[in-house]
Image (spheres, rainbow, N blue to C red):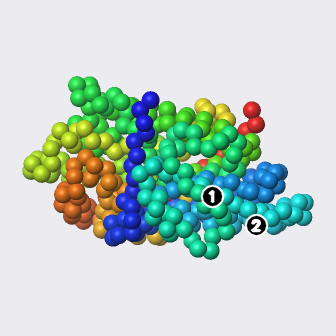
Amino acid sequence: MAADEACPMKGGDGPNSYAKNSIYQKGAVDAAKELLSKAIAEKLDLEILLASNSTFQIADLGCSIGPNTFWAIENILEAVELKYQIQGMKKSPITLEFQVFFNDHTPNDFNMLFKSLPLNRQYYAAGVPGSFYGRLFPKASLHFVHSSTAIHWLSRVPKDLADRNSRSWNKGKIQFSHSSDEVIRAFEAQFSEDMECFLNARAQEIVYGGLVALIVSGRPDGTPHSDSSLNVIYHLLGSCLMEMARKGVVSEEKVDAFNITMFYMSPQELKAAVELNGRFTIECMENLPRLSTIDNVTESPQLIASHVRAVTEVLFQQQFGDEILDELFDLYRTKLEEKPSIFDPTKAINFLVVLKRQAN
Ligand code: SAH
């Protein structure tokens, strides 16, 4: 199998960085806080907590560079502490310690992540490089796995798309949602394969009874890929790139060969993958409330453009070079301004899924 393709967010803390342009993703972390605390209070086995040998091990998969990952970890720690104080302390007085593993692809700006670790943190921090579609941790070494707005990145462009003579050659597009049935099927197959790898790896790494909490950026059940608002805004970005290709600013061939691997799954699709895998029970699956901070982003052409840039700039840079970035994202912002209601809030969701590892 080919190595997973990295999709690093824009590093550093400059004006185009992910750290400065990820309010949307923060909105998902904030919106999940209450449900996540409830899931920890109700679904995390006290025995797991107390048998953790006083060190509770947490991993955040696809953490990027912060600060959202730090908020997410704070929320988890707070809820686990509370559960211990209310239910565990009397049974077994231990000094609970936390170790947090921050995972992302190797090219992620881990330096920036480590430099910005909260000074008053109540946990030991470690970085774990590598793809979450493979094994990252020793067997049964984690008690809690978290991942927020990350598993919509597939591991790779489906290999059928590499053949320019096949019906899956994605001509003139940068993602799959508005493409032929062949292209859509290739992405759906890649999604199923990736989810199986993801769940198999976690099933080995997490202790029996341990929890996996996934905050997923997706589309509502029954929504075709081409109607999903997140896909619609990326499709528009692709049309800007094609406009530049027609003007000769970028090579059309390079556009044809370029594919972004985001797959906005529906809750139903994730449920089917978990059931097929069979190692986890679904303890909670709920759409998250839409916070006004998220609407502020999706109603602003400027903010959509800067968010999309922070997420995709590195990929465009690798394929087309530095020189096209400003022109591309300026054109994109202008096109977004021409379509102020392009982001239909009913066609994009963030949802929370909490899974529990079953004993074999
Ligand atoms: N969780 C963070 C970052 C979300 S951005 C937040 O809430 O702000 C998505 C992150 O997932 C990116 O940093 C990207 O590099 C990472 N990612 C995507 N696919 C990955 C994979 N297969 N393995 C590890 N990290 C991955």
Residue at 39% x, 49% y: name it: 7
Residue at 49% x, 63% y: name it: 113
- Mark 2: few/some/many CA within 10 Å (<14, 14-19, 20+): some
Q: Quadrant of residue 18?
A: bottom left
Instruction: Quickly name the residue at label 1.
Output: 100
Instruction: Quickly name the residue at label 2.
Output: 82
> In this orientation, which residue lies closer to the viewer: 44 or 144?
144
Q: Reply above or below: 288 against 117.
A: above
- Calculate the distance from the C-alpha at mark 1 to the C-alpha at mark 2: 18 Å
Is residue 228 left or right of 89 when viewed as pictured? Answer: left
How many labels sit on residues? 2
> Which residue appears farthest toward the left when viewing the image?
247
Is residue 238 left or right of 2 when viewed as pictured? Answer: left
Question: Which part of the image, by quadrant, shows the C terminus?
Answer: top right
Q: Quadrant of residue 280?
A: top right
Q: Which element carries disc 2, helix, strand or loop?
A: helix
**Which amino acid type is marked by label 1?**
Val
